[in-house]
């Protein structure tokens, strides 16, 4: 469990204090689309996993305040080791990372010595170090299409993203059995009820969704791909099958359109809020900037080993943002 905040911050103007500290620390605030709207609104940059990795690699700030989950902040540290990288709540993990302990992954790899390991970025630094190439959901298609068809592949830890890629590319990658607890929670029955109420509304889904949700999607892609689809689809209502905090960016960009979060089993999409992303708050961001803690620290040997597979991703994905997305199902 995450530690409660013990100090009384009630008299503080948190937004103003964060602004002040951001300047004092020469910090850049990077936020994922699944962060609370108040955090997205003050971030220097809001993006998907690939875009945030690129920003972390390129920044000339001294401090990266990463408003996302731990594997994302670790990625920032791997790519920018000289920076101080802070994460407002160190317990902000990910069910996919949890599903894939490095020792078990190493044994899986050892059983398949002729396979390369293509690994989703939602994993620990230790699993990245055991992998050949990292992918994000926005770079997976471009990267997989560069791997010879006769090259056997292990794909982990998301079996739904891996299964989606297998179907789309006619591959037979061996899949690690991890899932995202958030995308797993969407209900097909409730989605069909919602579609019946909005027969003209397309469905945009993240590839972490299980196949019974993907089967009803008009568009499948990363968070940035879904946002782009929201800006360009011709209708006025969109059903969004990913973490609902991304709807904030849609409403800012296209206020005249209606965005409806896909429902979970109880018909209420609140169960699809990522509990890990939700651990970051304005209070914790303020404390992290003030104390420069909690901070990502990493053993240099591990960092260098993990960096190789991330560099492969950045090379193979280069020039792909926007056009290298997973696209239509
Ligand atoms: P994106 O790379 O599409 O932003 O996905 C990250 C993630 O964790 C989705 O659950
Ligand atoms: Fe992990 Fe799922 Fe949360 Fe993304 S939404 S960080 S995959 S638990």
Image: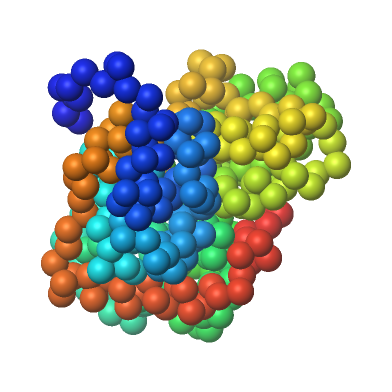
- Left or right side of 215 for 157: left
Relative depth, front residue between 291 and 152? 291
311 relative position to 62: left or right: right
Report x, y in % for residue 221: 61, 52
Residue 26, image x, y percentages: 35, 55
Q: How many numbered discs, if any?
A: 0
Q: Is residue 49 above or below residue 7?
A: below
- Quadrant showing the N terminus: top left
| Residue 238 pos. (x, y %) | 73, 33
Query: How far across and how far down the image is residue 69, in percent?
Result: 34, 45
Residue at 43% over, 50% down = 30
Nearest to the observer: residue 124 or residue 171: 124
Residue 166 visible in this rendered orientation of the protein: no
Here the colouring is rainbow
- Residue 300 versus residue 159 in the image, above or below: below
Query: Going 33% across and 81% down the picture, which residue do you hit?
Result: 114
Q: Quadrant of residue 35?
A: top left
Image quadrant where residue 287 sits? top left
Q: Residue at x 32, y 49 (%)?
A: 24
For the question of whether residue 26 can be seen, the reply is yes
Judge from the rendering whether residue 101 lies leftward or rightward of residue 205; answer left or right: left
Front residue (pair 271, 20)? 20
Q: Residue at x 45, y 23 (%)?
A: 271
């Amino acid at each position: 469990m995450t530690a409660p905040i013990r100090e009384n911050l009630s008299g503080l103007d948190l937004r103003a204090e964060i602004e002040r500290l951001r300047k004092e620390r020469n910090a850049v605030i990077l936020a994922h689309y699944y962060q609370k709207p108040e955090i997205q609104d003050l971030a220097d940059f809001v993006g998907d996993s690939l875009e945030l990795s690129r920003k972390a690699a390129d920044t000339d700030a001294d401090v990266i305040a990463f408003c996302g989950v731990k594997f994302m902040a670790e990625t920032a540290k791997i790519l920018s080791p000289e920076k101080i990288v802070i994460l407002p709540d160190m317990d902000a993990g990910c069910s996919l990372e949890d599903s894939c302990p490095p020792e078990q992954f190493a044994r899986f790899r050892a059983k398949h010595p002729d396979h390369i390991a293509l690994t989703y970025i939602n994993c620990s630094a230790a699993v990245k170090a055991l992998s050949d190439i990292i992918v994000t959901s926005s770079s997976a298609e471009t990267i997989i299409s560069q791997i010879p068809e006769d090259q056997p592949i292990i794909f982990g830890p998301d079996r739904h993203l891996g299964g989606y890629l297998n179907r789309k590319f006619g591959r037979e990658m061996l899949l690690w059995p991890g899932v995202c607890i958030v995308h797993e929670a969407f209900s097909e029955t409730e989605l069909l009820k919602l579609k019946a109420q909005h027969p003209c509304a397309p469905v945009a889904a993240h590839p972490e969704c299980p196949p019974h949700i993907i089967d009803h999607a008009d568009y499948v892609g990363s968070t940035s791909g879904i946002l782009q689809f929201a800006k360009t689809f011709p209708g006025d209502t969109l059903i969004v099958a990913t973490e609902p905090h991304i709807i904030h960016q849609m409403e800012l960009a296209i206020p005249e359109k209606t965005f409806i979060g896909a429902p979970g089993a109880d018909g209420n999409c609140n169960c699809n809020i990522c509990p890990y992303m939700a651990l970051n708050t304005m209070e914790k961001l303020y404390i992290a900037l003030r104390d420069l803690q909690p901070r990502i620290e990493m053993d240099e040997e591990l960092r260098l080993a993990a960096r190789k597979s991330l560099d492969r991703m950045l090379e193979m994905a280069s020039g792909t943002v926007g056009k290298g997305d997973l696209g239509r199902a």
